[in-house]
Image (cartoon, rainbow, N blue to C red):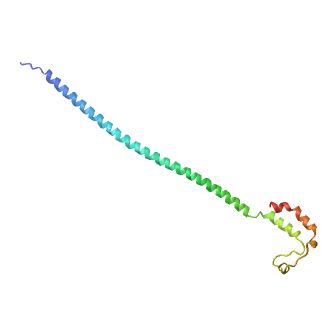
């Protein structure tokens, strides 16, 4: 029987399989890196877009907070103005009633004929007693 040395043939085949395995491994590694890079880039873009939207919302929130503060100030001013406009019921009515008591004799309402014609009593007849009485309530005239 003839003995054939198959060792060189096996070595050549082993080297070919080894090279083929290395080529496939490198191809799979390159493909994996490419897929990782694409996914990473896509996710980074989405994160950047979301961060941009978040920054925009934060800026708008700051603007709205300023507008809310301004609206609160305007409402406070409006309430203050309305409070000043509204007569303080009892105090002013009381003051008008008191002043009517101290009115000078002969002073009549504007729709009366005597006032329209210019007739009235002289200051001497008015009496300083009533003028002094009105002076007691002068604080109400300055600061109602």
Label total for image: 0
At a point 49% along the width and 49% down the height, the residue shown is: 56
**Hey, which quadrant is residue 77 in on the image?**
bottom right
**Hey, which quadrant is residue 141 in on the image?**
bottom right
Task: Measuring from the top left, give residue 48's x and y in whole percent.
Answer: 43, 44
3 up-or-down from 102: above or below: above
Task: Measuring from the top left, give residue 106's x and y in whole percent.
Answer: 89, 75
122 up-or-down from 26: above or below: below
Residue at the farthest left position: 1
101 up-or-down from 80: above or below: below
Does residue 90 appear to the left or right of 132 in the view shown? Answer: left
At a point 72% along the width and 61% down the height, the residue shown is: 83
Viewer-proximal residue, 104 or 64? 104
Q: Quadrant where the C terminus lies?
A: bottom right
112 up-or-down from 47: above or below: below
Q: Quadrant where the N terminus lies?
A: top left
At a point 16% along the width and 25% down the height, the residue shown is: 12
Task: Measuring from the top left, give residue 27's x and y in whole percent.
Answer: 26, 35
Task: Measuring from the top left, give residue 91's x and y in whole percent.
Answer: 81, 63
Does residue 27 appear to the left or right of 63 in the view shown? Answer: left
């Amino acid at each position: 029987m003839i003995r054939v040395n198959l060792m060189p043939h096996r070595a050549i085949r082993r080297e070919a399989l080894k090279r083929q395995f290395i080529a496939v491994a490198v191809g799979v590694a390159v493909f994996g890196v490419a897929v990782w890079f694409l996914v990473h880039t896509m996710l980074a873009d989405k994160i950047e877009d979301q961060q941009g939207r978040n920054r925009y919302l934060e800026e708008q929130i700051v603007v709205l907070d300023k507008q809310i503060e301004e609206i609160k100030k305007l409402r406070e001013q409006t309430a203050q103005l309305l409070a000043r406009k509204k007569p303080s019921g009892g105090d002013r009515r009381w003051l008008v009633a008191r002043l009517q008591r101290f009115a000078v004799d002969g002073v009549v309402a504007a729709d009366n004929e005597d006032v329209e014609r210019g007739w009235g009593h002289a200051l001497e007849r008015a009496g300083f007693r009533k003028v002094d009485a009105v002076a007691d309530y002068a604080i109400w005239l300055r600061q109602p």
